[in-house]
């Protein structure tokens, strides 16, 4: 390429990186606001921050694309220039604090500028070009505390005071006492730890979500390492209280569940945080951590690299997912890969009076909403290429028949133009037939708890059939069919009026008017509780779900601005607080109004 061409490539690279730097500066500024909102108890504003931050990436990509088209002629933004643009971009990233995110941003801009689908070429970052190991943070990724110097109790106080919250702890001495008791229960005969070889590494920024701030760190005792997480909440007076300390890795991992809202974390080197968390929780993928830090585009990039790698070293076929087929989605899976792929049909089943855009909007709603551990997050992709010879014929036939606009066959590839990817769960309707009677009863109780959690979070699921719920590997129940969900505040919860005469009650026809948005909870029973054993357990634990009063009260609370507590750990792990921490001058907790 000529000297002029290389100059143009350098200018294009500079413009793209400038667009990314603007994006991440705004991302950090929004994340940094969480500290002040947590201190002020502005819970609704924290939820809004999480929701608004999701759209930022796409907006900045579109800005960068518009600027490139404005500043450069069309003949500059071609494949020949783009090869040198990528090389120039790599050079710019050598001392960058977020090189992996900048590479992903480059890919997003590249695909929009070139207007083609690149499945395997040198014009985008299919693999990372810059290492994220040992990038130095300006503020520090973690801080280290040594109990040998000041004693264990003072060191724990130093950890709690490290984050410079502008509101006091109600009773820090009691918080420390509770923490030590929890540590004794976890470490058992290993307690007390040898202070001579003991130190704590604590991530520099707290992780904010909903009404809680989480401290993440590691206890290092000689060659042994133990993760921990401290959950800090407000008491009714607005003072700080340690709600629990988690030491069990599986319990900490649940905080990073795909069914939870993203965290707000202020960090200049995200890879440092991800590497630290990965060392704490090796059972979690790096993609999981990037997602939960609000960097879902990077998570998508990592996930797709892992998916491509899995395809290279596996040989099983994509097949239709087991279970009852949906009316809106074609769902398929690769048995050796723990995910499902969901494609919106061109033709929906009966009583589905909406289009593909409507369905996409519902998935967007869920991504922005507080999922409270009950809604599955999704990865959304366009133009996904999978080997045609790895596709089961039954799957191909269904895609061609019911979703022809969503697929294209190019030589030996099946191109799926739009797809959602979710973790594979065990469908509730299938699980209830497989498990013991005791386990079945627990699933029924968990089903009711799921509906109540969703209602509290302003979500009415619409289609509450068991086939639309799945069981996670930790036994948690998740709702994953979104085409009929509505906000609770958009629903009208009503009682069924008395029938004009007994004959109406025996008829299949309803005798009362039904308007859009009307919901009659009394109708749930006949549809959901056909099995006598299921009905018995459900009525024992969740009879209130069949009443208009339950749903209306939840709706009224939401309209009043009440944000209820959701704890991603068992109630049994929460500390029992003393009178000072509970602020017993108040007779009623503001959190449970």
Image (cartoon, grey):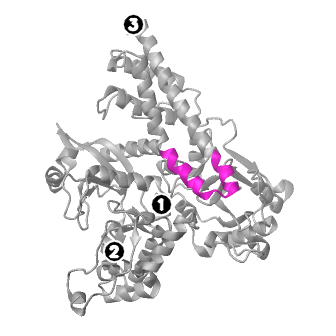
Does label 2 or label 3 sit earlier along the sequence?
3
Q: Is residue 136 left or right of residue 541?
A: right
Residue for point 37% across, 67% down: 470
Q: Nearer the viewer, mark 2 or mark 1?
A: 1
> Magenta region: which residues?
33-54
Inter-mark Cα distance, 3 to 1:
53 Å
Label 1, secondary structure: give it: loop
Does label 2 or label 1 sit earlier along the sequence?
1
Label 3, secondary structure: give it: loop
Taking depth in this image into account, of 172 and 69 the one nearest to the observer is: 69
Dot 3 crowding, Cα within 10 Å, few <14, some 14–19, many 20+: few
The numbered disc on residue 371 is 1
Give residue 26's position: percent from left, percent from top: 57, 37
Give residue 173's position: percent from left, percent from top: 81, 67
Which quadrant is home to the C terminus?
bottom right
Inter-mark Cα distance, 2 to 1:
23 Å
Question: Which residue is at the far bottom?
Answer: 502
Residue for point 32% across, 65% down: 516
Inter-mark Cα distance, 2 to 3:
65 Å
Q: Are marks 2 and 3 in contact (CB under 8 Å)?
A: no
Q: Is residue 336 left or right of residue 152?
A: left
Label 2, secondary structure: give it: helix
- Residue corresponding to mark 3: 2
Type of secondary structure dominating the magenta stretch: helix
């Amino acid at each position: 390429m000529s000297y002029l061409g290389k100059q143009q490539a350098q200018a294009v690279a500079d413009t793209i990186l400038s667009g990314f730097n603007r994006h991440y500066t705004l991302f950090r500024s929004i994340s940094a606001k969480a500290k002040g909102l947590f201190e002020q108890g502005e819970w609704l504003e924290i939820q809004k921050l999480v929701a608004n931050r999701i759209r930022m990436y796409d907006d900045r990509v579109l800005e960068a694309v518009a600027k490139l088209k404005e500043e450069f002629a069309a003949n500059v933004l071609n494949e020949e220039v783009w090869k040198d643009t990528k090389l120039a971009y790599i050079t710019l990233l050598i001392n960058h604090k977020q090189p992996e995110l900048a590479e992903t941003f480059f890919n997003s801009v590249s695909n929009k500028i070139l207007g083609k689908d690149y499945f395997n070429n040198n014009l985008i970052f299919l693999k990372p070009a810059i290492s994220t190991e040992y990038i130095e943070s300006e503020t520090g990724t973690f801080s280290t505390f040594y109990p040998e110097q000041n004693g264990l109790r003072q060191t724990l106080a130093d950890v709690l005071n490290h984050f410079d919250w502008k509101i006091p702890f109600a009773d820090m001495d009691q918080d420390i006492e509770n923490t030590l008791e929890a540590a004794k229960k976890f470490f058992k005969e290993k307690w007390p730890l040898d202070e001579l070889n003991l130190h704590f590494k604590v991530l520099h920024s707290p992780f904010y979500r909903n009404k809680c701030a989480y401290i993440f760190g590691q206890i290092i005792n000689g060659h042994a390492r133990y993760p921990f997480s401290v959950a800090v909440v407000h008491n009714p007076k607005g003072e700080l209280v340690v709600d629990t300390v988690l030491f069990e890795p599986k319990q900490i991992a649940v905080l990073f569940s795909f069914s939870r809202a993203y965290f707000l974390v202020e960090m200049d080197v995200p890879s440092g945080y991800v590497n630290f968390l990965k060392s704490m929780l090796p059972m979690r993928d790096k993609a999981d951590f990037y997602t939960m830090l609000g960097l879902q585009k990077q998570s998508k990039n990592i996930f797709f690299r892992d998916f491509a790698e899995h395809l290279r070293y596996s040989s099983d076929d994509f097949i239709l997912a087991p279970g009852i087929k949906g009316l809106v989605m074609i769902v398929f899976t690769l048995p050796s890969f723990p995910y499902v792929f969901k494609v919106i049909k061109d033709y929906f089943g009966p009583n589905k009076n909406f289009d593909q855009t409507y369905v996409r909007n519902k998935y967007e709603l869920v991504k922005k909403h507080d999922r409270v551990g009950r809604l599955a997050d999704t990865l959304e992709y366009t133009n996904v290429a999978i080997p045609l010879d790895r596709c089961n014929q039954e799957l191909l036939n269904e895609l061609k028949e019911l979703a022809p606009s969503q697929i294209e066959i190019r030589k030996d590839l099946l191109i799926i133009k739009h797809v959602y990817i979710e973790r594979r769960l065990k469908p509730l309707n299938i699980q209830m037939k497989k498990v013991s009677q005791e386990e079945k009863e627990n699933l029924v109780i968990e089903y009711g708890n799921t509906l109540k959690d969703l209602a509290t979070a302003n979500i009415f699921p619409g289609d509450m059939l068991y086939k639309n719920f799945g069981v996670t590997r930790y036994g948690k129940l998740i709702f994953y069919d979104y085409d009929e969900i509505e906000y609770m505040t958009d629903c009208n919860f009503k009682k069924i009026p008395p029938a004009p005469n007994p004959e109406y009650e025996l008829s299949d026809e309803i005798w009362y008017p039904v308007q859009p948005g009307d919901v009659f909870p009394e109708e749930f029973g006949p549809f959901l509780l056909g099995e006598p054993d299921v009905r018995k357990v459900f009525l024992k634990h969740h009879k209130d779900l069949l009443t208009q009063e339950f749903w209306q009260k939840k709706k009224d609370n939401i309209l009043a601005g009440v944000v209820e507590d959701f704890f991603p750990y068992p109630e049994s792990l929460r500390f029992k607080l003393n009178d000072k921490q509970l602020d017993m001058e108040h007779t009623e907790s503001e959190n449970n109004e």
